[in-house]
Image (cartoon, rainbow, N blue to C red):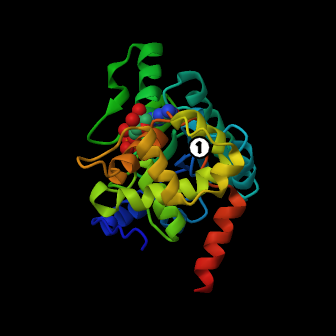
Amino acid sequence: MSIQWFPGHMHLTRKAIGERIKDIDVVIELLDARLPGSSGNPLLAELTGHKPTLKVLNKQDVADPARTPAWLDWYNARPGTRAIALDASDAAPARRLVEACRQLAPNRRGLSRPMRVLICGIPNVGKSTLINTLSAKREAKTGDEAGVTKQEQRIVLDDDFYLWDTPGMLWPRIIVPESGYRLAASGAVGRNAYDEEEVALELLAYVKRHYASLLDARYKLGLDAQAIGASHDDELLALIAKKRGAVMSGGRLNLQKAAEIVLTDLRSAALGRVTLEIPEEFESWLAAARLK
Ligand code: GDP
């Protein structure tokens, strides 16, 4: 079974972005650095056409630092696209976004109107945090209270640089089952749309192969990496339940509780810095889906 998630109002968002896009110089797509491919919405490229695009891999502080550069290279190899990695709460790096946008649209020189940038991202990717960080910076710098204009969803970052928030909600679009599990783990998908045990098992299947030592350190499994990699996913979840005292009356293991623990630890990075996909994997999932 895979995750089915069809939230409403996507057609309204599509229409609203479509109307706004003609005045926009650069589109920023905020991605989750722990699942960059899966957290992107292909609909956006469809709507924004050939507008220069900045991919911002947010939450880099909780992503695997060994994997983020490969994702940046993957996006930077695309024409009209640049990619940077950030931690949305960190003000100075967030400011790099302004520079990156200016570099993406250099042919605006000579135009008198301000640069207009549209920022989009699926739920929980950190858009509000980033917007707050950027607008607080502006307020701190200028003492100007009109930095954030809620009704218009426009944030004035510099006198000649306007950031527009997405009109409507950009929901994730689940194209491959692998992405569905990762999106559920990241908190981008409504809780009633998936079964926590199923998602935790899928993620353990991945994490045990790539981050066995983090699993061992977090849950004191007492197994070496090879043994963790070789265990069945349900045995691993049962062992985590046991180690965490997730037991029901009568002594049966509470696997639902163990699944919640695993997902909470992944989301909060209590498990450690983990990235749940590399570009080659994501490409192979897409290719397999196309063959179906
Ligand atoms: P939005 O739905 O895209 O507006 O996401 P929010 O800004 O509400 O952020 C969702 C969650 O991710 C919150 O718990 C934030 O504190 C957290 N978050 C946002 N940006 C970062 C980041 O760069 N690093 C980390 N570790 N957490 C972040």
- Check the image and report above or below for 224 versus 188: above
268 versus 137 height, above or below:
below
Circle 1 crowding by C-alpha within 10 Å: few under 14, some 14–19, many from 20: many
Number of labels in the image equals 1
**Is residue 126 in view from this perspective?**
no
Quadrant location of the N terminus?
bottom left
Looking at this view, name the residue that lies furthest to the front. Answer: 250
Q: In the image shown, does 263 or 59 lie closer to the viewer?
A: 263
Residue 19: quadrant of the picture = bottom left
Front in this rendered view, residue 52 or 8:
8
Task: Name the side, left or right, on which 71 lies relative to 25.
Answer: right
Between 139 and 181, the one nearer to me in the picture: 181
The kind of residue tagged 1 is: Leu
Residue 193 visible? The answer is yes
**Screen quadrant of the C terminus:** bottom right
Taking the image in four quarters, ligand 1 sits in the one at top left
Q: Position of residue 257 (x, y in %)?
A: 33, 47
The image shows residue 146 at horizontal and vertical percentages of: 33, 25
- Residue, x 49% and y 42% (percent of image)? 266
Residue pictured at 69% horizontal, 45% vertical: 225
**What SS does tag 1 mark?**
strand
User: Which residue sits at x=46%, y=21%?
Assistant: 138
In percent of width and height, residue 73 lies at 75, 50
Q: Residue at coordinates 44% horizontally, 65% vertically from top-left?
A: 173
Q: Position of residue 98 (x, y in %)?
A: 59, 34
* Residue that mark 1 sits on: 57
